[in-house]
Amino acid sequence: MEITAAALAAELCGASQEDPLLAVLCEAAEAAWESRLDPGVTKEDCGGALRCAAAFMAAADYMGKRCRAESFTVGEVTVRQSGGQSAAVMAETLRQTAERLMRPYAASGEFCFRGVRG
C-alpha cells in the first residue's frame, strides 16, 4: 500500500486526512512540483521524494492558513497567542525541507538573473 501525500501531510500538521483543504493543497503541491521537474525527469524518477515534498509544502500551507492572529486588543485588554510565530517557523522549515528533497530532480524555486544585459 502506497502512502499518499495527503496522509503524510495530515501526519505533519496534525490534521484529518479527509480535510478538503488539505486534500486540495496536496494536489496543488504535487502539480507544482511536477511542473518544476528538470527536463527528462519524470515523477516516477523521484521515487517518494516528490510525494514527501508535496506533503511538506501542503502541510506548510495548511499551517499558514490555520494560524490566527498572534494578538489582538480590545479596549485595554490584549490577548496574545504564542503559537502563531512557532507555526510560521515550522511552516518555513517544512518548505525548506521540501526544496532540499527535490533539489536533485527539480529546478530551484529561487529566481536569479543570468546573462541579462542592461
Image (tube, helix red, strand yellow):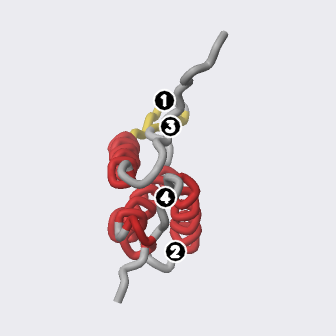
Do labels 3 and 2 touch, CB within 8 Å?
no
Say if 82 sits above or below 34 in the image: above
Q: Is residue 25 above or below residue 86?
A: below
Quadrant housing the C terminus: top right
Q: Position of residue 68 (x, y in %)?
A: 49, 48
- Mark linked to residue 72: 3
Give me the residue at 56% from left, 57% from top. Answer: 32
Image disc number at residue 19: 2
Residue tagged by mark 4? 62
The N terminus, quarter of image: bottom left
Q: Are marks 1 and 4 in contact (CB under 8 Å)?
A: no
Q: Marks 3 and 2: which is nearer the front?
A: 2
Pointers 2 and 4 in contact (C-beta within 8 Å): yes
| Crowd tier of the residue under label 3, counting other residues whose Cα lies within 10 Å: few below 14, some 14–19, many 20 or above | few
Q: Find the distance from the CA under tag 2 to the CA under tag 1.
A: 38 Å
Residue drawn at 35 percent across, 42 percent down: 89
**Image location (x, y in percent) of residue 90:** 34, 48
**Of the image marks 2 and 1, the number of the one nearer the N terminus:** 2
The residue pinned by badge 1 equals 76
Q: Sequence-wise, which precedes: disc 3 or disc 4?
A: 4
Query: Disc 3 marks which amino acid?
Result: Phe
How far apart, in angstroms, are the residues tagged by discs 2 and 4?
A: 10 Å
Q: Earlier in the sequence, mark 3 or mark 2?
A: 2
Residue at left offset 56%, top offset 24%: 113
Q: Please tell me whether mark 2 sits on a helix, a strand or a loop.
A: loop
Q: Position of residue 49 (x, y in %)?
A: 36, 63
Alpha carbon separation for disc pair 3 and 2: 28 Å
